[in-house]
Image (cartoon, grey):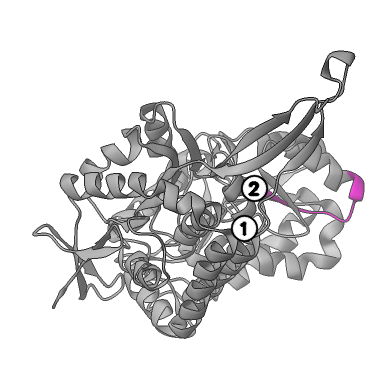
Amino acid sequence: METLPFLLAGRRETSDDVLLVHDRYTGELIARVALAGAEAIERGIAAAFASREAMRRLPPFERQRVLEHVVVRLRERAEELARVLCAEAGKPLRDARGEVTRLIDTFKVAAEEAVRIEGDVMNLEISPRARGYRGFTRKVPVGVCSLITPFNFPLNLVAHKVAPAIAAGCPFVLKPSERTPICALMLGEILQEAGLPEGAFSVLPCRVSEVGPLVEDERIALLSFTGSGKVGWELKARAGRKKVVLELGGNAACVVDEDQGGQLERVAERIVFGAYAQAGQSCISVQRVLVHRSLLGPLRSMLVERVGGLKAGDPREEGTFVGPMIDEGAARRVEAWIEEARSAGATVLCGGGRRGAVLEATLVEGVPVHLPLHAEEVFGPVALLEPFDTFDEVLARVNASQFGLQAGVFTGSLARAMKAWDELEVGGVVVGDIPSFRVDSMPYGGVKGSGLGREGVRSAIEEMSETRLLILGPTE
């Protein structure tokens, strides 16, 4: 089996340090990936820094052309990418194909936004001393971007950093998760064909011990990290003066208001999708289902029936809904949290079994709020059911979390929808659907322990740009 090279300054290179990538379900070896060491990372940063001017001068229509080329090639390789994603991340084919579709959408939106990066004309004549002065602003690239991505969406979360960087005119060094490096390298192959300036990008799988320069090097202007809160806040503390964007975790709540009795079938269907798709390995996966007490019994019955019928197992089988978690250790952790909650008096309504890295879709009721299953991010196929009595009470309970990424609110009341938007301490409130809903063009990010800054293509372009002001004095 040949070793897959990494991409250093847009060129293929290899090393003696090799990562073995195994199929998440079968355990079969599927790839050998060369890992970048300290010297390669230094060269990647230096090449990106040297390409800043070339990237800055790349006209918007050329940036758009690069992104459109990527879209064409992604469409041609869509099924290949989905199959690789199924193997290296363990995603059921349905989810893998869905991620490839979103990947393409993200690059399409970036291509459109690349020619819409505009400034403002300002009226500076706010007092007699400013008579005759005019102001203009424009957006300029921030410079070299360090992009660090997680394992759970190894295509689309890479796209949410790479595509805006290209649209903004920023060179970048990408470190994909060492658990799922193949998809990022395939995307890098496509970028090799696209005609970016020399040295403008590198895709460098590397060990965590080597990541320091991608965080601390002063030639890097922006660090964009998606991953766990513990790691993200540590990296921010080490990043110095550079801009930092963090997209971290959550334990997303979904509120089902008392007027939803006639919509309960749809509500249950959406909750099941939001909680168990991707094996729950999404930072906006439905974790806490807070339902008005009058609807608790009917919703419980609907959820138990649906969750109990979900097929878990081989992600290559078309009917599989819950595939393996990223590894057996992750599944064992969640299994232990479930057992801890059960010992503390919680009731496992369905699921809870584990076979290797495959954890059954699990629904639990009565979990004490101080236990990890409730208070932390589960990042697995588990949802918690709990009743509430008043809308004010449930908003306070949603806000009691250390996280604040997104929340879902099923309500037919416009007043309550607006109250939730006013009062919930989250980055996004989704009314009439689950918190797991995301469109790749929308602003996306959290508050409190869930992060800093916003992604979504246009928002990411803004993060990767700086405002430059021009003042014209009186002409007479």
Quarter that holds the N terminus: bottom left
Q: Identify the element where label 2 is drawn.
A: strand
Q: Residue at x 21, y 72 (%)?
A: 31
Q: Are marks 2 and 1 in contact (CB under 8 Å)?
A: yes
Q: Residue at x 62, y 36 (%)?
A: 467
Q: Earlier in the sequence, mark 2 or mark 1?
A: 2
Residue highlighted by disc 1: 436
Q: Is residue 412 magenta?
A: yes
Can residue 157 be seen here? yes
Please state if 125 lies on the left or on the right of 449 as rendered: right
Is 91 located above or below residue 318 in the figure?
Answer: above
Can residue 438 be seen here? no
* Start-end of magenta stretch: 406-415
Residue highlighted by disc 2: 406
Marks 2 and 1, how far apart at CA: 8 Å
Residue 155 figure quarter: bottom left
Q: Residue at x 77, y 65 (%)?
A: 264
Foreground residue among 191 and 330: 191
For badge 2, the amino acid type reads Gln
Residue 146: give x, y in percent of width and height.
Answer: 39, 45
Q: Identify the element where label 1 is drawn.
A: loop
> Mark 1: few, some, or many residues within 10 Å (few <14, many ≥20)?
many
For badge 1, the amino acid type reads Ser
